[in-house]
Image: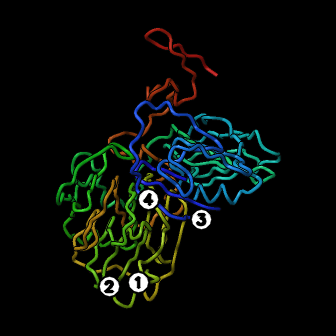
Amino acid sequence: MVYDGTNETVYLDGTFMGAAAHTQTAYPDGNYQYQLGTGRTVGAWPSIPDGTWVNFSGLIDEPTVYSRALTISEVQSIFTAGSNGKSLVTISPLLLAGGSVGVTYNQSCSAANGIAPYSFAVSSGVLPLGFTLSPGGVLSGSPVADGSYTFTVTAEDANRCVASRAYTLQITGGQCLPQPAGLTGWWRAEGDANDFTGANHGAPQGAVSYAPGRRGEAFQLDGSSYVQVPDAAALDGYPLTLALWLRTSSTGPELRGLLSKYVDSSLNGFSLHLANGHLGAWYHRDANDSVNPGALGLDGGAVADGAWHHVVFTVGPAGGALYVDGALINSVSWFGTPGPPTTTAPLLIGRFDTYMPTFDGLIDEPMLYSTALSASDVLSLFGSGSHGLCGHCTAIPANLIGWWRAEGDTTNQCHLRARPRGTGVSVRRH
């Protein structure tokens, strides 16, 4: 029996049998004890007077009480476990040590209270790019981007008893990336919709606001707001790259633009968008020539999981490619003859044509290039993480040997070791 605060639900052998609203007033003193194998009637049952204590006759095994309502899948998994019962397996460590960009990471996970050997796997979430978790429980890799990565590790013992633990791995370090050639538009969302390249400023439409983003601030869109950039020939790029960070949990079936310069059914222009929580993209020169395999275009997989994702769509003579978090997810060759579109539609950030609702979530650092970035360029752009492209910053002068950025620690970017001491630091070379 499961009580969720409103309804009482009964299951038998993992199967739902029925549910009803709870109508009994709670006893105010809370001093009643659990009675196992016996109970008292309330109201007259057939041949049993009111208030009679009745004892169970038979076998009872594994009686359990939880301080929350179990889900139907949890109830079914307990029944399915049969004689193996509920898992007592535990996973260590409780927390993961942080890592640094470019520094090899190695952390062993272990399991106890079960029957060895144990097999480890990631059951949900995403490891940092370049990381693996071995079946033996070794988490290792060399992180390429800073950020906070959340995932769940499961351990299964020889009797197939399973335990899980949620982890958050914090990766720090890195630096901004010098701007690749061909940057045509860069809307940084630092309190406005201006183009950092200075040529194609956007105008917020509706209740566009700004919230903490992957780098600085991000456009916060609410399903009815977006940013519109006027049409310009420079935005009809070929080759082309569209890039941005996004964060959303919206999985609705509506087509919601991310970076789109396209009038519906025109077969002229391009679009990077979401539908059903999946990333999609297409590029049309005209009705006969396109980078579009059909339906919603190239499928970049599910990205509406509430986490930050870096998405990139490139188009060049070889066709189109779609990347998520630095990794190539899908690609397709041209259908017909390569070339630029001639659309006069505005460039929309967070909307597809006139479709509603618009994007619901955060978009940060949207960019448009008049070149198709290479796979290594895309990986470097993702790897710059919260540092992003170098904007106001300058190249590092030669012979820098000490640089303590005070970004929450005393690490020296030049590999000196600093230790807090009073109101200052002491420095030792290594």
Please name the residue that numbered disc 4 is placed on: 20
Q: Earlier in the sequence, mark 1 or mark 4?
A: 4
SS at badge 3: strand
Which circle, 1 or 3, is nearer the viewer? 3
Furthest-bottom residue in view?
288
User: Can residue 259 be seen from the camera position used here?
Assistant: yes
Task: State the image quarter where residue 416 is shown.
Answer: top right
Please name the residue that numbered disc 2 is placed on: 267
Q: Are marks 2 and 3 in contact (CB under 8 Å)?
A: no
x then y, percent, for residue 23: 39, 51
What amino acid is at disc 1?
A: Ser
What amino acid is at disc 4?
A: Ala
x then y, percent, for residue 250: 37, 61
Please name the residue that numbered disc 1 is placed on: 290
SS at badge 2: loop
SS at badge 1: strand
Question: In whole angstroms, how far apart are the C-alphas of marks 1 and 3?
Answer: 51 Å
For the residue pair 152 and 325, the one nearer the viewer reads as 152
User: Can residue 245 be seen from the camera position used here?
Assistant: no
Q: Earlier in the sequence, mark 1 or mark 3?
A: 3
Q: Earlier in the sequence, mark 2 or mark 1?
A: 2
Q: Are marks 2 and 1 in contact (CB under 8 Å)?
A: yes
Question: In whole angstroms, how far apart are the C-alphas of marks 2 and 4?
Answer: 54 Å
Question: In whole angstroms, how far apart are the C-alphas of marks 2 and 3?
Answer: 51 Å
Q: Is residue 341 above or below residue 305?
A: below
Question: In whole angstroms, how far apart are the C-alphas of marks 4 and 3?
Answer: 16 Å
In the drawing, what numbered circle is on residue 15?
3
Q: Earlier in the sequence, mark 2 or mark 3?
A: 3
Task: State the image quarter where residue 350 is shown.
Answer: bottom left
